[in-house]
Image (cartoon, grey):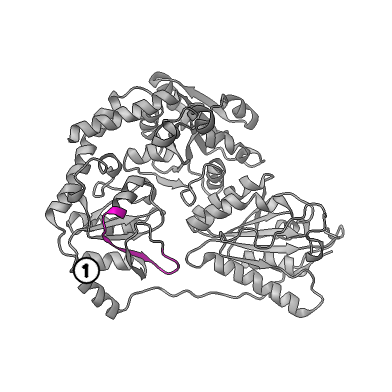
Amino acid sequence: MIIQPLIDLANICAKKGIKNIILSPGSRCAPITLAFARHPDLHCRTISDERSAAFIALGMAQQLKKPVVLVCTSGTAALNYAPAVAEAFFQQIPLIIITADRPAEWIDQWDGQTIRQEKIYGRHIKKDYSFPDEFSHQDKAWHANRISNEAINISQSFPAGPVHINIPLREPFYPAENEKFDYSSDVRLVEQVDNENILSEEALIKLKSQLGSYNKIMIVPGQQSPNKELQILLDDISKSKKAIIVTDTISNLQSEQTINFHDQFISFTDKKSLKPDLIISFGKSIISKSLKLFLRESNADHWHIQPNGEVPDTYQGLSKYIYCDINQFLNFLNKHLDHANQAFYQAWHEANNAIDSKMADALENIDFGEFKAIYKILKHIPKNSKLHLANSMSVRYVNFLGPREQEIICNRGTSGIDGSNSTAVGCTFTTKDFVSLVTGDLAFFYDRNAFWHNYAFNNLRIILLNNQSGGIFRLIDGPSKQAELEEFFETKQALQAENLAKDFNFKYYTAKDEVTLEKALEEFYHPSIRPKILEIQSDSVKNAQILKNFKHILKEDLQ
């Protein structure tokens, strides 16, 4: 039996420029699946594991800057989307989540694959909708059309994010054998026109006057995609010594002009000389806990810039949020800021340059382990590769090492380890360039179903740091001092990636020292018909000691 509003939902997605659909197999979702799968302008893929499917969709939407649609059946299938939904919400990535459901009268009646699906994602969703469960009156079809249009529009308005459409369906689920679907060209579209978020001349005059009260200004970009125009503006502000720019690797705005090594010196440098009187932030989260704590203790005023929406008080000093385009605001700053306090500017740049000058020698002289392996590997990753970083130590190692030429992608919305592989696989579906994933063993094996499908991703390169445990817990004071460290925090495991590589047809390499690492890297980035895994085998205890020694060397040189 054909349900025309479902056909129209797929058609509205296509007409609004959505092209990619991730389907997970099921019976109750069959009418929705067929509506999308038969549309001539939509590209559908089937991913059986819903948790992986959702992160694959997220990885695609990150790159496409357009919503990707997810479709699953009723019951716990919908719950398995939840980790990626939360990540998409905090990373501001648009997803259209469509879940099939039982009609309302069958909820809580012990019917199969039936749970309470309305508002299932709680507060980690921009908006949720309940589709009509029958269309006997024309207003029901009108309502379905309105939901379809509104959900797509809301997913893309700032801040972008996931929306949920829950669709109750009754049997029969399947059309007759030769039934045709009508993707009518006259389906109603509701367009959204956004404001440009430009500050008025009056607002700019007021801000210019207020800026005169500060001369120790720190600009802190949060996580975002690369932006050449922003990079040029920030570099100009830094070169002219009007403010300091403090950047994490996930900002994708690091350069020779920005402060990139704050994690290595902020904890043991004279904090009084580094203290700002105004913090200006934009983008999303930052990695550095030490920087966050420093800024919270600074008592500096904090201005956050974004087009609209809720503004977090990350540094506990929020005094102004400014709704405007960040390019407009940085151009305004560059034009109207006076020179920063000389001692403040020099304190930051001298500490940063001192670390920078010591890094190469210190890295060459440390023992081999996963940190040195990452240092060596990063030199071989092509400039145009997308570089995905799993959470815990992978992203921190790369952050320690300073500016990168590749686009950096990491799931820092919730900072979980659960979807790193899948997000990277989703990225491979959007580009022919290499996609590199640096990941630890727990994150990697946790998400192995990322590779359980029938689609090619031969441009994927995985660098697996396998120390048989969650090594980050050796670097955190609390768990590292507990007798239960290995069993209950590190979670020791004995898995190797070689068998997984055979299961999923990866080319497999392994390295235990610099010689075998360099040998593997000779061909790791050669084009191939298969994806590749390079497994770095190391010891968790030794890795922790290497990093501590490295930090100690840098600290000694600066004191």
Does the magenta-highlighted stretch encompass residue 191? no
| Residue depicted at 36% across the width and 41% down the height | 399
- Give x and y (percent) for residue 347: 17, 48
The answer to which of 372 and 547 lies nearer the viewer is 547
| Residue depicted at 41% across the width and 30% down the height | 481
Q: Quadrant of residue 327?
A: bottom left
Magenta stretch bounds? 296-311
| Residue 292 to residue 387: above or below | below
Which quarter of the rendering shows the N terminus? bottom right
Asked if residue 559 lies left or right of residue 284, the reply is left
Residue to which mark 1 is pinned:
211
The answer to which of 528 and 401 lies nearer the viewer is 401
- Give x and y (percent) for residue 68: 59, 57
Q: Which residue is situated farthest in the left direction here?
A: 342
Q: Amino acid at mark 1?
A: Leu
Residue 367 appears anywhere in the view: yes
- Give x and y (percent) for residue 230: 32, 58
Asked if residue 440 lies left or right of residue 32, the reply is left
Residue 38 appears anywhere in the view: no
